[in-house]
Image (cartoon, rainbow, N blue to C red):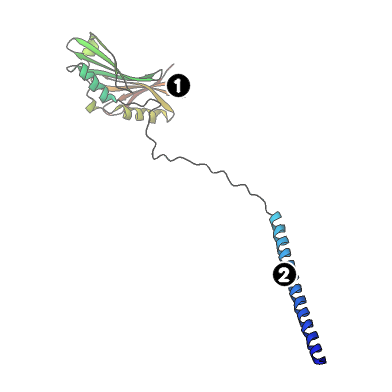
Amino acid sequence: MRRKIIIGILSICAIISAAVGTWYWYNAKQNSISMESTSMDADTVKLKKVALPETKVVPTTDKVEANDGPDPIMVDAKGAVNLYKKQYPTAQIKGITFAEQDGRKSYEVAGVSSEAGHSVMIDATTGQVLSAEVDTAPENLKESTAIDLGNVINPDEAKQVAITILGSSARLIRWELETKEYVARYHMVLDVNGDIMYVVIDANSSQVIEVTKEG
């Protein structure tokens, strides 16, 4: 009987010891978790926001089309001559002028047929014939050599020659192609930072003949 009592007491002690050990282990684990959490919180407080550099999106130019101002030129010099020829098929071309004024880009094509002189104004952005005039051809126009666009540099090439001479800031205002003493010439008018410059170019050789400044 006494032996059973001793065994019972030992069993109870073992259970209590196990319970105490479990309780101690649990508290130690909780303290460890609490310390880690506190450490993490302390580290979080030390974090600072770093401003990122501004990122700008630069559009690519792959899809950008060439555009000569808000109203692009849809008719070139040859196109203007063809429109003139539809009006006066037998006329000889004696002069071609391109000008930009008040936002309008236009051509004037002048020619001679028999004793008559013809002048046609054409909108460079639409190809519309704005006006057509017939008059007695002046002697100097009748005697001048006809212009063949196939034998001269085109207006864009003449423009590049003028800009090469005057600098990249030069802006074309007007050009005229005519013949003088059997030589086809471009008379280019350009604005260079407010100064009006005149450049005369041999339309056959692209050589610069003369450069003058207004005023």
Between marks 2 and 1 in the image, the one whose residue lies nearer the viewer: 2
Percent across and percent down for residue 201 are 32, 25
Please, what is the three-letter code of the amino acid marked with disc 1? Asp
Q: Under tag 2, what secondary structure?
A: helix
The residue depicted at 78 percent of the width and 86 percent of the height is 8
The residue depicted at 69 percent of the width and 56 percent of the height is 44
Quadrant of residue 47 in the image?
bottom right
The residue depicted at 77 percent of the width and 76 percent of the height is 20
Residue 196 or residue 209, whichever sits in front: 196
Residue 26 or residue 52, whichever sits in front: 26
Q: Which mark is residue 89?
A: none
In the rendered image, which residue does mark 2 sit on?
29
Note whether residue 180 is visible. Answer: no
In the rendered image, which residue does mark 1 sit on?
195
Percent across and percent down for residue 188 are 35, 22
Q: Under tag 1, what secondary structure?
A: strand
